[in-house]
Amino acid sequence: MDKPPRTWRPRAGYLAVALVLAVIGCGVLVYLVTTPDPDLVVVATPPPAQAGAAPAAGAQPAPAMQQAAAQASQPSPAARAPEGDADPTRDLKSYVARGEKPTMPEVIERLHERGIYTGLGAFSPPGTRPPLVGLAVPENFELPPGYVRHHQATDDGQRIEAILMFAPDFQLYDSAHQPIAMPKDRVVPPELAPPGLPIRRIVIPKPVDPASPGR
C-alpha cells in the first residue's frame, strides 16, 4: 500500500524567528526616521506681529533690541555740539551776536582782541592806517635798482596812484661812500628821487558818498 505524499508546513520556530526580525527591522526604521540629524540646525521663525498689536504683559525685549534702540536714541557724533572751543572752522558769526550788524572796523577790532591776525584779522581797521603820500611814479618810467612802486587803495575801494618807495634793505650812499639816512617808512623824499623823475606828489581821492547813484 502506497504512502500519501508529505505536505510542507512551516515550523513554529521559524515563524517566531521571522516575527522577531520583522519587529526589530520596524523599530530600526522608526528610530532612523524620528531621530534628528545632529548637523541640521532648525531655526524657528516667530510669526509676524500683527499691526497695532500690543506686546504681551511681562514681555521683555531682547538685549540686542534694547542696545539697538539705545544707540538709535543717541545723537550721532557729527550732530553733537562741539565742546568748548573745539571747532577749528569758526567764522565771523562766532564773534558777532545774532541780529547785530557791526561795521568792518568793529569786526577787525574784535578779531584783534581775540588774538586773531589771519583772514580779515590781517588787515588794520579802516581809517587807522591812512594811505602813504609820496611821489607819483608814471607807469612808463623805468626805475633804477633799489626803487619800487607801492600801490594802495582807499577804505572804500578807490585805487590810489602808485608812489615811489625804497626796496627793503636798500641803502643809498653819498659821493664819499657814506650811508645816507633812509626814511623809516621807506617813502622816497624829493631830494632822493632818481634822476629824470617828475616831482609830483599824489592826491588821495575823497571818500565816495554811499548814497550816491551806483553805490
Image: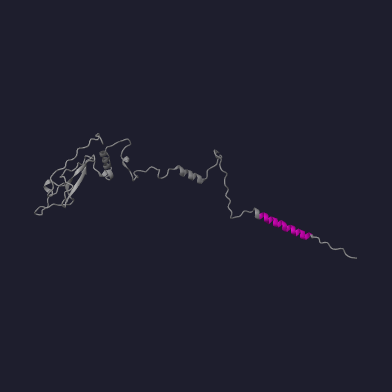
Residue 209 versus residue 123: which sits nearer the camera?
A: 209
* Residue at point 79%, 59% (across, down): 12
Can residue 151 be seen here? yes
In this rendering, is residue 74 above or below 212? below
Q: In the picture, which quadrant includes the N terminus?
A: bottom right
- In-image side of 182 versus 12 (left or right): left
Residue 121 versus residue 148: which sits nearer the camera?
A: 148
Residue 114 versus residue 101: which sits nearer the camera?
A: 101
Where is residue 126 shown, x and y percent of the image? 23, 40
* Residue at point 21%, 44% (across, down): 152
Tell me how the rendering is colored.
one colour
Q: In the picture, which quadrant includes the C terminus?
A: top left
Where is residue 199 shown, x and y percent of the image? 12, 45
Where is residue 136 shown, x and y percent of the image? 16, 45
* Residue at point 46%, 43% (across, down): 72
Taking the magenta stretch, the answer to whether it contains residue 30 is: yes
Q: How many labels does the image show?
A: 0
Taking the magenta stretch, the answer to whether it contains residue 165 is: no
Can residue 185 be seen here? no
* Residue at point 66%, 55% (across, down): 31
- What is the residue that sits farthest to the left in this orientation? 176
- In-image side of 142 versus 106 (left or right): left
Write the start and end of the magenta stretch as one range: 12-31
- What is the residue that sits farthest to the front in this orientation? 140
